[in-house]
Every structure is written in C-alpha cells, then in structure tokens.
Image (cartoon, grey):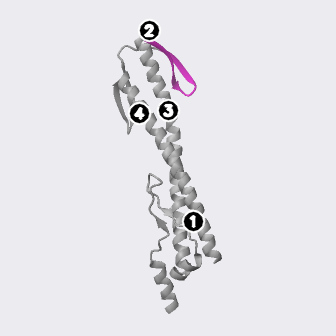
C-alpha cells in the first residue's frame, strides 16, 4: 500500500515538461527535451512522467486538429472574399464609365438561369457581414473593407500554418520523449 500511495502521490506532482515560449502567437507551451531520462525517472517516477508526457501529447494533437480545421475554414473563405472584391471593383469601374447598366445571368433555381439588366447608378453595394446582417456601403468603403478582410484572412492563414508547424515539432519531441521514457 505504501508503494501505491507513493505512485498516486507522484502522479499528482506537476512535472516541468513544458516551458513558456514566444515562438508562436497562441502561446502554445514548448515541450522540454529530456536529455537525461534516468535522472527524470528517478526524480518523478516513470509512471508519472509518462502519464504527464502522454497527456501533453494528447493536448498537442487536439490543438493541431483544431488549428487544421480553422485553417481549412479560412481557406474556404478566401476565394469568396476575392470574388466579392473583384465584383465590387467591376461594379465601380462600370459606374465610373458611361455604361450605367449591367447585364447579368442569375440563378433562379437548380440549373435554371435568367438574364437581367441591372441599373448601376447608386454607387452603393450591400455586403453580407454574417449573422444574417447585410450592410450597405459605397464602392470605396466596400473595397477598403474587403481589402482589409482579405489581408487579415491571409495573415491569419499564415499565422495558423506557423502554429501548426510549431505544434508538429512539439509533437515529434513529445513522441521521442515518450519513447525514451518507455524504453528506459
């Protein structure tokens, strides 16, 4: 029973297997590479060390899957933002020219299209902002907003990819630590 209590107590002790880092924007902790496994096992016990390292590994995998999902969501929004930006630019160029009407084909229902002549003399466009909210902007404001949204989305994708790469490095280090602890 004394041995079991010692193991149970050792499992509760927090082991410093991570360190703070400024390498990523989300403040994901950096895993410590265990150089001298024997000393760590002697100090914290192999069960406790393995359990906490495995828990950290699971957290890294969870974060990685969430970041990958977030990256895919951002990548699907990017073409929509680009198309909307191009459309508003085209509407503005048409409004600035002598042609104040636009010929368009629009979708009525599946595989049924209709032709329409749309007046383009207001200088305004409605943009969906999400949550069933549409706001009317003039062309210049809409172009500025869409350009800012595009830049933000591209920056967020880049940041997310950097964080995924950082997490992959941490996952690899954790896997090596786990193998070394297990084989010790």
Q: CA distance from mark 3 to mark 1?
A: 38 Å
Outermost residue toward the right in this view = 183
* Residue at x 42%, y 35% (from the top left corner): 149
Residue on which the image places disc 1: 174
Using residue 54 as the reference point, say whether residue 26 is left or right of it.
left
The residue to which callout 4 is attached is: 148
Characterize the local packing of mark 3: few (<14), some (14-19) or many (20 or more) Cα atoms within 10 angstroms: few
Q: Secondary structure at mark 1?
A: helix
Furthest-front residue in this view: 35
Disc number at residue 99? 2
Which tag, 4 or 1, sits closer to the chain's start? 4
User: Could you give the CA–CA distance between mark 4 and mark 1, rounded to whole angstroms?
Assistant: 38 Å
Say whether disc 1 or disc 2 marks the residue closer to the N-terminus.
2
Task: Assess whether mark 4 and mark 3 are in contact (beta carbons under 8 angstroms).
Answer: no
Q: Give neighbour class at mark 2: few <14, some 14-19, many 20+ (Cα, 10 Å).
A: few
Label 2 or label 4, whichever lies nearer to me, is 4
- Magenta residues span 101-116
Q: Main secondary structure of the magenta part?
A: strand
Instruction: Find residue 129 and report its horizontal and vertical position in percent.
Output: 38, 35
Sooner in the amino-acid sequence: mark 2 or mark 3: 3
Using residue 123 as the reference point, say whether residue 160 is left or right of it. right
Are the two marked residues, 3 and 1, in contact with CB atoms closer than 8 angstroms? no
Task: Find the residue positioned furthest to the top.
Answer: 98
Q: Nearer the viewer, residue 111 or 155?
A: 155
Disc 2 versus disc 3: distance between alpha carbons?
Answer: 26 Å
Location of mark 3 (residue): 80
* Residue 74 left/right relative to 132: right
Q: Is residue 169 visible?
A: yes
Residue visible at 52% across and 49% down?
Answer: 162
């Amino acid at each position: 029973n004394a041995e079991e209590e010692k193991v149970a107590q050792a499992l509760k002790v927090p082991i410093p297997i991570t360190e703070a880092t400024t390498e990523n924007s989300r403040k994901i902790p950096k895993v410590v590479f265990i150089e001298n496994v024997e000393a760590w096992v002697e100090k914290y016990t192999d069960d406790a060390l393995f359990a906490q390292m495995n828990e950290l590994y699971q957290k890294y995998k969870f974060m990685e899957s969430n970041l990958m999902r977030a990256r895919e969501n951002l990548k699907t929004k990017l073409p929509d933002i680009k198309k909307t930006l191009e459309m508003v630019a085209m509407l503005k160029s048409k409004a600035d020219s002598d042609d104040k009407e636009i010929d368009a084909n629009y979708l009525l229902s599946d595989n049924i299209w209709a032709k329409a002549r749309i007046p383009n003399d207001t200088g305004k466009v409605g943009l969906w902002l999400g949550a069933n909210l549409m706001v009317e902007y003039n062309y210049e404001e809409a172009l500025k907003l869409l350009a800012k949204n595009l830049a933000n989305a591209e920056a967020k994708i880049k940041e997310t990819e950097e964080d995924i790469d950082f997490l992959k490095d941490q996952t690899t280090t954790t896997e090596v630590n786990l193998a070394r602890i297990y084989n010790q």
